[in-house]
Amino acid sequence: MQKIIHIDMDAFYASVEQRDNPSYRGKPVVVSGPPNSRSVVCTASYEARKFGIHSAMPASQAYKLCPQAIFVFPRFSVYKEVSLQIQSIFSEYTELIEPLSLDEAYLDVTYNKKKIESAMAIAKEIKIKIFNTTKLTASAGVANGKFLAKIASGMNKPNGLTLIHPREAETFLETLPIGKFHGIGKVTESKLKEKGIHFGKDLKAKTEGELIQLLGKNGSYYFQIVHGVDNSKVIPNRKRKSLGSEETFSVDISEIRLLEEKLKEVAQDTSRRAKLSNLKGKTITLKLKFSDFEQITRSKSLPIFIQSEEEVYHFGQEILRTIEISKKVRLIGLSLSSFEDDSSQPMLQLF
Ligand code: TTP
Ligand code: MG
């Protein structure tokens, strides 16, 4: 039997804004573009949700529902930073982490690094660590499969910790309204309701063949789910193999001094990305594209793992100086690869 935890931060972007701006706390906060634009709501604080505001709603509609709400622009780099922090907490327990977005992940803790038997105990620890590190709350769901773990984490938001015990699982599913089945959208929901299927027990009354007819290729999956079988695995994102940055110039360049200036910019950006992902590389690759679109790449294996702007620029420049520039250049790029193998690092495939 698997032990799965699903973790989901509460009102994520809005909570980060309330954390960083104490005057927003306890107030309706809407993270979106300006309310008089065509932008949509990324998310809303729980105070704003009381007015009926929710994700994906036009910001203009949110304004009508609650003109006194505080509208703030998203700050993605801050959310990414928090995301890396929580991933790093997860990886203290397991490498089997499947992030679904910046604020949400499945963890398989069946065999965990700390050899803790109880998945509930792990979930509790993780929630505390998340709060201590980020000053933000998360909700966690614990179950024997991904399907129920995800439903569980949504049951007692915010700051919830919910277990769906294996022996309750089948009854729980029988009474679950079909709209709550993850993956069954509004359209399918009304289609099923027209056929008298309102709860899990109605799905369970069908044969696998009937469910395939009703739900297409997902029919077999839901057949297993309602019979208490959920073998879907937590699939960790593959570790990234390289990262880098490139720039296409507005005007083609032939002067080496100008090329080196551009190289400095892409080195800066490459280093920034490497730091964000906590990665150091031992191979550096320079890419040039010429005005006739011919493209060359030159790689160099380094004696050390590098990450800083100075190092990336230094070795990039070394490669650049070995290349004879006989045509104008339209693009320059740098990338790092052959990363230090540090398995204590979280899986970093968020960007
Ligand atoms: P969610 O976890 O779906 O929502 P949430 O964390 O804001 O609130 P909840 O407490 O219900 O989990 O999404 C995480 C973040 O992703 C959310 O804070 C903003 C962003 N997001 C969007 O930008 N657009 C969307 O449509 C949704 C659903 C989320
Ligand atoms: Mg969330």
Image (cartoon, helix red, strand yellow):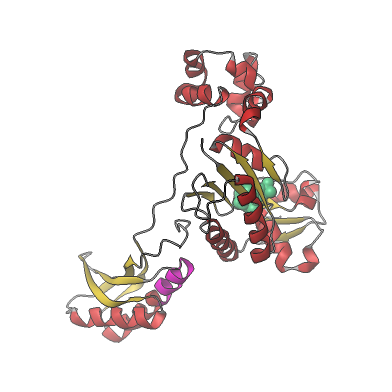
The relative height of residue 191 versus residue 334 in the rendered view (above or below) is above
Quick check: can you spot residue 168? Answer: yes
Extreme residue toward the bottom, this view = 257
Residue 88 position, x and y percent, is: 53, 61
Residue 1, given in percent of the width and then of the height, sits at: 51, 35
Q: Does 260 sit above or below residue 211?
A: below
Residue 23, position as x, y percentages in the image = 80, 67
Residue 106 is a magenta residue: no
Examine the rendered structure and indicate whether residue 284 appears above or below residue 112. below
Look at the magenta stretch and give its main secondary structure.
helix
Residue 313, image quadrant: bottom left
Magenta segment range? 268-278
| Apparent side of residue 336 relative to residue 97 in the rendered image (left or right) | left
* Place of residue 65 in the rendered image (x, y in percent of width and height, measured from the top left): 80, 47
Question: Is residue 275 highlighted in magenta?
Answer: yes
Residue at 64% in and 46% down: 120
Q: Nearer the viewer, residue 68 or 205?
A: 205
> Which corner quadrant of the image does residue 270 belong to?
bottom left
In depth, the one of 96 and 213 nearer the eye is: 96
- Total labels drawn: 0
Q: Measured along the vertical axis of the image, is residue 277 above or below residue 149?
A: below
Q: Is residue 38 visible?
A: no
Q: Residue at x 63, y 22 (%)?
A: 200
- Relative side of 346 to 70, left or right: left
